[in-house]
Amino acid sequence: MVSTFAASRNRLILGVCLPLAVLLGYLLAEPLESSSLAVVVMVLSVLVVPLLMRWHHPLLIVSWNAAITPFFFPGRSAIWVLMAFVSLFFGILGRSVSSANRFLQEPRLTRSLLGLLGVVGITACMTGGIGMASLGAESSYGGSGYFYLLAATVGYFALTSRPIPRPRAQLYVALFFLSGLTAIISHLAFVAGPRFWFLYDLFPVELAMDQALAQGAAGPSVVRINGFVQAAPALYCFVLARYGIRGLFDLTRPWRMGLVLVAVFASLFGGFRSTLVLLGLMFVILFLIEGLWRTRFLWIVLFSGVVVAGAFLPFVDKMPLSVQRTVSFLPLDVDPWVKLGAQDSTTWRLEMWRTLLPDVPKYLFKGKGYAINAKELLLITDAITRGDLKATESLAFSGQYHNGPLSVVIPFGIYGLAAFIWFLGAGVRVLYRNYRQGDLELRRVNAFLLAVFIARIVNFVFIFGAFSSDLYYFTGLLGLGVALNGGAGQRDERNRMASDGFEPERE
């Protein structure tokens, strides 16, 4: 009976696979046809379902910071958006078939995040609904902002759908941060030439646009290696999360400090001053959290900083223009053209904020939302072309405020701002409790997650922020922290006794 059943099953599999192979072969004869692509994607999606059921959580973690934008996803959204919804679906499916597959509970975070999403949803209903051009909307735009806020929320619950196994904690942390190195691939594809441009079907071509434009520029131009803005912090975060600041100064392992210096130097080629400031904030806050300011490490760090600055600063004016622009906020001798461009960037931002501030009271109790009327956008664009309006007014109209608090209070009013502050406060509390009361083996990682979360808040409030695109940074860090610690950190007696310092590193 057993052999008869096995033979029947084999025939069934063969009977399904052969016609399917013939169908796919026929469709791939015209691979660029939309109908062919739709069928191929659908078939491949069905085939990967067993893999997703088993590995959806690790795949979500590795995709969270990855610079991958599949061509078949509407609007070329990042891969983490797709995986967030897929992982949450399988998480709910697993919970429905077994009570053991419980989502990790952190009530304060859950309530604050759902409250924030509720404010966003009510505002959307009161301000013209959700319109997404990528999905065919013609009368209004701006729905992508709502979509990314929803995806960031879904991603948090997907990340907390199951705990991360303790023996694999370091591996998952490495996957979470190092996946950001994929941002380099766009630049490598451009340098390699047209034969490799097919990679842009999966990786964002926008990262290499500055390189492409620089080839046709007549005069000097700041060629920003935009991928380094994501890749350099990815390497930086991995090293600090894995070894902490104390571990960087282990003279028997000099490659650790070498990796950090490589990451910082690479970040300079991005041309963004905020990137260097953010890396500095992470280091300083983690230094304080680890309590190293009360030890000899304070003098070691100061001396190392002086040595590195002395080796780098005399040659700043000979560095590429993108590097000079990154450090142009410091009192250094940089190219006058670069200095002027950086000052102009600051000036127009301040001008836009001065223009927006008088309008804030108008949106305090009923936010503006993200919906943009297509006809109004066309009229404003035309007015800018004629010189009747400034470009900053167009950016403000489209919701690009280049300021974190304004990107919350204008679209969602005082209620959205209060809900966001509630969420950030709950997040800091959870990460701090994980650090103080969590497992001692995760103490270094928990310290770093707390430091980078606070650094992100400071950067969002005082330097640069955009609510719709930055929320996923916060929910990702919190989701990772909750998953690592199995929920809120449980009190560990060893951790309480070691609360004033770190135990020696374990290899």
Image (cartoon, rainbow, N blue to C red):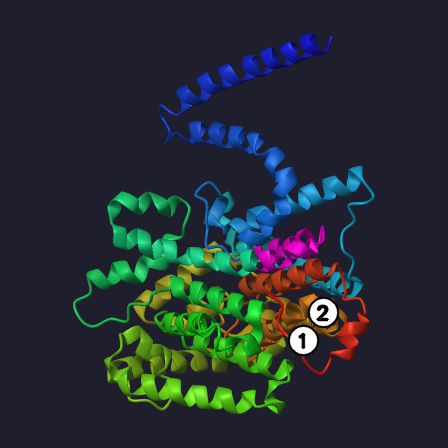
For marks 2 and 1 on the same chain, the one whose residue lies earlier in the sequence? 2
382 vs 194: above or below? below
* Viewer-proximal residue among 409 and 108: 108
Write the residue at 26% across / 55% down: 191
* Viewer-proximal residue among 411 and 148: 148
* Disc 2 and disc 1 in contact, CB within 8 angstroms: yes
* Viewer-proximal residue among 446 and 356: 446
Give the residue type that dot 2 points to: Leu
- Can residue 36 be seen in the rendering of this structure? yes
> Which residue is the site of mark 1?
503
Residue 500, picture quadrant: bottom right
Give, as a single range, the part of the protein colored magenta.
148-173
- Residue 171 part of the magenta segment: yes
193 to the left or right of 391: left
- Can residue 122 be seen in the rendering of this structure? no
Considering the numbered disc 2 on the image, is that residue within a helix, a strand or a loop? Answer: helix
Q: CA distance from mark 2 to mark 1?
A: 8 Å
Give the residue type that dot 1 points to: Glu
Considering the numbered disc 1 on the image, is that residue within a helix, a strand or a loop? Answer: loop
Residue, far front: 252
> Which residue is the site of mark 2?
440
